[in-house]
Amino acid sequence: MATGYLDILRARHAARLLAGTLVGRLPNGTAHIAIVLFVRAEGGSYTLAGALAAAYGLATAVGQPLLGRAVDLHGQPRVQLPAAVVSALGMAGLALVGLGSLPAACAAVVVAGLFTPPLEGGLRALWPTVLGREDRVHRAYAMDAVAQEVMFTVGPLLVTVLVSLWSPAAALLVINALGVLGALSVVLSEPSRTWRSAPREAHWLGALRSSGLLALLGAFFFVGLALGSITVAAVAYADDHGRESVYGWLMAALGLGALIGGAVYGARQWAGPPERRLRIIVGLLALGYLPLTLTPGVPAMTLLAALAGVFLAPAIACSFIVVDRHAPRGTVTEAFSWLVTTFGVGAAAGTAVAGPAVELGGTAWSFAVAGAGGVAASLVLLATRGVLAAPGRTPAVVAGSENDRNGAAEPGFSSGHKA
């Protein structure tokens, strides 16, 4: 298993691109906790902290596909780095202005969110050319999903360390400075500098004119909803058991399950259409969420949380392949950015729904939201399998991906199958 991942990391530019992207995404991965800690330190209420964090999230959801389209049109360096700098300046404005002017604080977080660079989609657009072979690209997608789990675990920890050593304002400044450095490392690399999107048909819908992509986005809205609801449900479960540490155990178990599942998934080659494989994985993901409604004792619940996380990273990794197959020619970065946006909006909806569910029916009901989200995602994929069976374009060989300046082939890679 480790040999396959080491093979990827030894490829020229691969380790730098992965590390740079993860560091560049730190501001986005830690913004919610950094904003909450900063607002509380400034004397603001939890309501205000939540409102500013929500404003940031909404702005990010709007900005990602727009910036992704700009990357497809103008290249990565001309979009990613300026966006990272403007986003960092927005967060720096919040740190320096504080809560003295609420309109200014809100404007700062909106600017920071709106200009969050689409590094995640940009990296996935680069993998085919950097790695060359289809099996290595598939494994890189799995490694990417696993690395996200690590980033979302380590990032909040880094914020809390910076807050304890200095202050919440310093944490905002340091995290966003690191984000700019990460983006700089990516855009100065040769693959990023030379990458060009394939010629695209002018259309105001861009990537969204693909019915297959729309079906995938619909499913992953509900996957995001399930995951977002679990974060609230886990807090309620910890409250029921009188220990805040229980929340940490549950979320750590969920992340550990995702790490294991992603690592195992990426260690082998998979036959057959990825669309069919995704339906199976999301179905198993839904089955993993349903037992959480039993809310047993802490040891058993921790084990159930780990099992619930096993199919998350494989589902995300497989979705990357499906996005590449269905994104219209010349829209690959925008398409990946739409997936990020839809997942994030779903997670926000999940947190919004799970709260009232706790109030109405208790902790079990909030975990039932996660189960319902997983089932809904599975049903969407089943209902749209006819649409997903016909990719919007035929993926070409990796050597002729979107990084091919001559545009000799369409972006992506051949899978050997047409789902």
Image: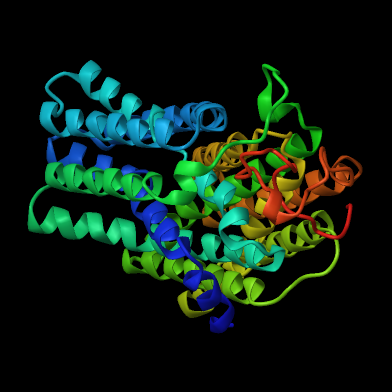
Q: Is residue 394 visible?
A: yes
Which residue is more in the foreground, 88 or 224?
88
Q: Residue 145, position in %: x, y?
A: 54, 60
Q: Quadrant of the N terminus?
A: bottom right
Residue 277 point in image, percent of width and height: 79, 61
Q: Residue at x 69, y 76 (%)?
A: 268
The answer to which image quadrant residue 357 occupies is top right
Please say whether residue 372 is visible from this viewpoint: no
Residue displayed at 67% across by 66% down: 288
Percent x, y of residue 194: 50, 43
- Locate residue 74 relative to residue 279 in the image: left or right: left
Q: Classify 225 as above or below 277.
A: above
Q: In this figure, which colouring scheme has been used for the structure?
A: rainbow
Residue 411 lies left or right of residue 302; in this view the side is right
x and y, in percent, of residue 62 in the image: 50, 26
Residue at the extreme front of the image, as rendered: 406
Of the pair 10 and 273, the residue shown nearer to us? 10
Q: Which one is in front, 231 or 292?
A: 231
Q: Give me the residue at 44% from left, 59% from top.
A: 18
